[in-house]
Image (cartoon, rainbow, N blue to C red):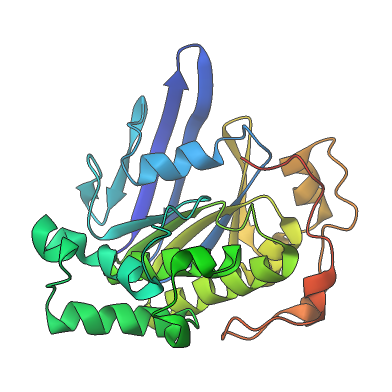
Amino acid sequence: MSRITVDGVTKRFGDTVALDDVSFEVPQGEFVIVLGVSGSGKSTLLRCMNALETPTDGEIRVGDEPVNSPRNDIAMIFQQHNIIDQMTAYSNALTGSLNRNTFLDSLLQRQGEADKLQALEALDTVGLLDEAQQSAKRMSGGQQQRVGIARALVQDPTILLADEPVASLDPGSSQQVMGYLRTAARKRDLTAVISLHQVNLARKFGERFIGLRDGRKVFDGYRDEFDMDVIDEIYGDIDTEGMFAPDSDRDGDDGSIDDASSKPVSGGGMGQ
């Protein structure tokens, strides 16, 4: 069961309240995007969901099991892809199997045939099978982030978390990465929670949206409810003009991009 529940979660850092009594449930297979300005609590929420931070109050559960420590069935993708430049795309993807192999076997790439095939399949999922033997340092930022996604998929998770995975990418690469994330989640029936600050990317790829402001949940709903009033509630006085991309610009599930790739995605200074 890959349902994940956030139940009354509060997280304090000294006198700072990063999350304030946040609750929601994500059923298996749903693709959720968390929105909010810098400091709204997006990164803290995802780190609590992966047990990289411990809530001050409240609880996070997968199925009926509390999340008290990092779990192999929860994979995390970070803003900085953290892949090893000197290794190939394939070797980086294969490191996702570390939880199933000894360090020495991983170092010498003595993983089993199933793990090696899974690494190739994951690279195929993110459109990089032909670049499997390319050195990571020779890849673009978007390609490197897609290698990071492949590595997460090799972990064989049921829940996929991504913290601002496209914040450092250009608009075209951002759309490609988001397309491949959505494709991977659908193909594998993953429960996915992705934090973003670009509203038009969120509308383009999201199914359900959760808005945070000052650590509080101020919105939880679906596309037909996600209008300018909601955006104003999430972003306050920040100018949101031009943040919406037309629904007709939604891309295909293969990660391909369309005319929207040249459009601005948001104002600056809103990264978490």
**Residue 51, above or below 197:** above
Left or right: 229, with 213 as reference point: right
Q: In which quadrant will I find the N terminus? A: bottom left
Most foreground residue, 224 or 246: 246
Tell me which corner region of the image, top left, top right, bottom left or bottom right, holds residue 222. bottom right
Q: Is 117 placed left or right of 93 in the picture?
A: left
Q: Nearer the viewer, residue 179 or 241?
A: 179
Give me the residue at 20% from left, 49% from top.
65
The spot of residue 70 in percent (x, y) is: 25, 46
Would residue 102 be visible to someone looking at this image? no
When asked about the image quadrant of residue 198, the answer is bottom right
Q: Position of residue 216 (x, y in %)?
A: 58, 34
| Residue situated furthest top in the rendering | 15
With 200 as the anchor, is 147 left or right in this view?
Answer: left
Q: Is residue 147 above or below residue 271?
A: below
Q: State the count of labels.
A: 0
Q: Nearer the viewer, residue 14 or 114?
A: 114
Decide: is 2 above or below 211.
Answer: below
Let me know if residue 74 appears in the view. yes
Task: Name the residue rendered at 85%, 49% in the picture.
Answer: 240
Left/right placement of residue 184 relative to residue 69 reads right
Give percent across and percent down for residue 62: 27, 54
